[in-house]
């Protein structure tokens, strides 16, 4: 894993670029996503199971993928912002280990590779007992921001 991008005492990248701050999209809001932590090193969010279940009463696999991709992409954009760039997802894969019927899940993205062109993050979705529900891997392409 590459070392996270350095920051100064105020938490800003030394290049003078401002770190991007997460803004929830419409789907994130509908899913009840809440941001707990956001940095180059780690992005953590929560989401309620209620309102995100499939017809059998279990947390919907698509909801896990949607929130996992969002959190992993946010982590990539935060890293990209240290270089004055943005990020777009190019690959995501997930393995579902177990499901949940209630409570809330925690989604944590940590970097596997932080490059100047590509990033790869591991995203873990866990239940309130800390059990792993889903593991995602997302790769993002870093690009110049379009004005």
Image (spheres, rainbow, N blue to C red):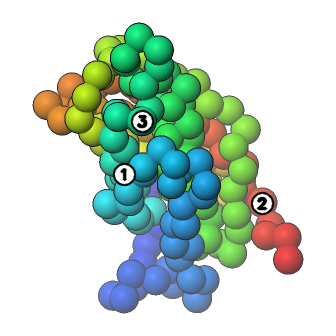
Callout 2: SS: strand
Which residue is depicted at the point 37% across and 17% down? Answer: 57
Question: Which residue is the extreme one toward the top?
Answer: 56
Callout 3: SS: loop
Residue on which disc 1 sits = 45
Q: Position of residue 139 (x, y in %)?
A: 63, 39
Residue on which disc 3 sits = 51
> Taking 36 as reference, is 112 above or below it?
above
Q: Position of residue 118 (x, y in %)?
A: 67, 48
Whether the residues at callouts 2 and 3 have beta carbons within 8 Å, the answer is: no
Q: Position of residue 85 (x, y in %)?
A: 71, 68
Of the numbered discs 1 and 2, the one sitting upstream in the chain is 1
| Residue 143 disc label | 2
Of the numbered discs 1 and 3, the one sitting upstream in the chain is 1
Whether the residues at callouts 1 and 2 have beta carbons within 8 Å, the answer is: no
**Gap between marks 1 and 2, in whole Å?**
25 Å
Which residue is depicted at the point 42% across and 51% down? Answer: 33
- The residue lying toward the viewer, choosing from 133 and 103, is 103
Q: Is residue 33 left or right of residue 98?
A: right
């Amino acid at each position: 894993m590459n070392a996270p991008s350095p920051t100064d005492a105020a938490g800003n990248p030394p290049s003078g670029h401002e770190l991007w701050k997460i803004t929830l999209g419409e789907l994130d809001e509908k899913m009840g996503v809440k941001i707990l932590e956001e940095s180059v090193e780690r992005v953590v969010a929560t989401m309620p199971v209620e309102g995100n279940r499939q017809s059998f009463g279990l947390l919907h696999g698509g909801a896990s993928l949607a929130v996992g991709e969002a959190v992993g992409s946010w982590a990539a954009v935060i890293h990209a912002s240290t270089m004055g760039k943005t990020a777009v997802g190019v690959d995501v894969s997930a393995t579902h280990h177990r499901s949940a019927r209630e409570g809330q899940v925690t989604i944590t993205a940590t970097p596997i590779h932080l490059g100047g062109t590509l990033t790869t993050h591991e995203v873990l979705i866990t239940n309130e007992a800390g059990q792993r529900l889903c593991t995602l891997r997302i790769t993002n392409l870093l690009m110049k921001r379009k004005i």
